[in-house]
Image (tube, grey):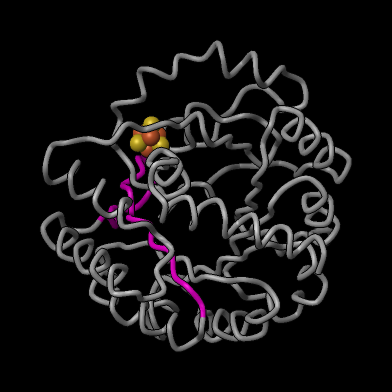
Amino acid sequence: MCPFWRRPDEELLSIEEEVKMMNALAGAGVSFMGFEGGEPLLRKDIAEILEESSKRFHTSMVTNGWLLAGKVREIEDYLNFAFVSLDGVGELHDRLRGINGSFQKAIEGIRSASGRIPMAISSTITRENMQQAPDLVNLASDLGVSINFQIAYDYSTADPLSPDRAKLKETIEFLKYQKLAGRPIVNSVEYFDAILNSWYGGEGWRCKPWLTINIDPLGRIVQPCYIINEYSGKSKVWEVDIRALWNSYDWESYETCNKCALSCYLEPSLFSWQNPSMVRERILDNVVSYITGQIG
Ligand code: SF4
């Protein structure tokens, strides 16, 4: 669904550049770092990168799970959280990924890492898998992990997999009530409410893309968010004054944008210190997991 695999990236950052990037971000006050792909586990030095990250940040990673079973012992000490992407249960996941055996590999990865790294399934709701949302929640529950949902956004360069509007509403309402019923769903109730209120009620959320810094594989800062800029940043993160760049950017014009519901942007946008369940889920649980990781 996402367009990033179409990038013609020539080379990746060296470990020295990764460290320069992390130092720049830590110096600017960043405290959470998430590694996404492509597939982060394809890097042979991934353990070294995660180790460096864990010295500075609460560290998480999204993986397709294929290599997880073989690498878990190498990386478990450096991750506070891991997400394994699943597009469906069984054959549907294999079909959407285009490789038979992908589902089995992802499940093996989850089983091998579960109990070693706090984990969740990450699933993007598309028109192809929407009917499997209940099965995905049940699968997460059976595996003893959580599940985080993203709603597919119709990127300009991607295939039109965005879900049918009316059916999507039913699915979002279903997931919200599953969350309220205590099923292991990572998204907040406010996340589902914000989408329902905006896309179906005309009452938008205030997007705050400045709360998330996105760095492309070449170390460049992507602004205002990777949806609008589609991963084409300009400045290497260690070559700029991040605070000055942030303060000089015209963020205001994006506050009314409700184009995507990517949880990495929407959840921070909705966060409120006045909401005890959000403070617990988003801050306290993460702080505990970070401290546990540091002393564990
Ligand atoms: S809703 Fe926010 S994160 Fe999404 S495209 Fe708009 S500005 Fe970017």
- Percent across and percent down for residue 23 are 81, 34
Examine the structure image and report whether residue 151 is included in the region drawn in magenta: yes
Q: Residue at x 75, y 35 (%)?
A: 26
- Percent across and percent down for residue 150 are 38, 57
- Percent across and percent down for residue 155 are 36, 44
Q: Nearer the viewer, residue 185 or 51?
A: 185
Q: Residue at x 51, y 78 (%)?
A: 145
Q: Residue furthest top?
A: 248
Quarter of image, res 213? top right
Can you say whether 96 is above or below 164 in the image?
Answer: below
Q: Nearer the viewer, residue 58 or 167?
A: 58
Q: Nearer the viewer, residue 130 or 287?
A: 287
Can you say whether 280 is above or below 73 in the image?
Answer: above
Q: Answer with the quadrant where ligand 1 appears in the image.
A: top left
Examine the structure image and report whether residue 21 is included in the region drawn in magenta: no
Quarter of image, res 284? bottom right
- The quadrant the N terminus occupies is bottom left
Q: Residue furthest right?
A: 16
Q: Residue at x 32, y 63 (%)?
A: 125
Q: Which residues are magenta?
A: 145-162
Can you say whether 23 is above or below 39 in the image?
Answer: above
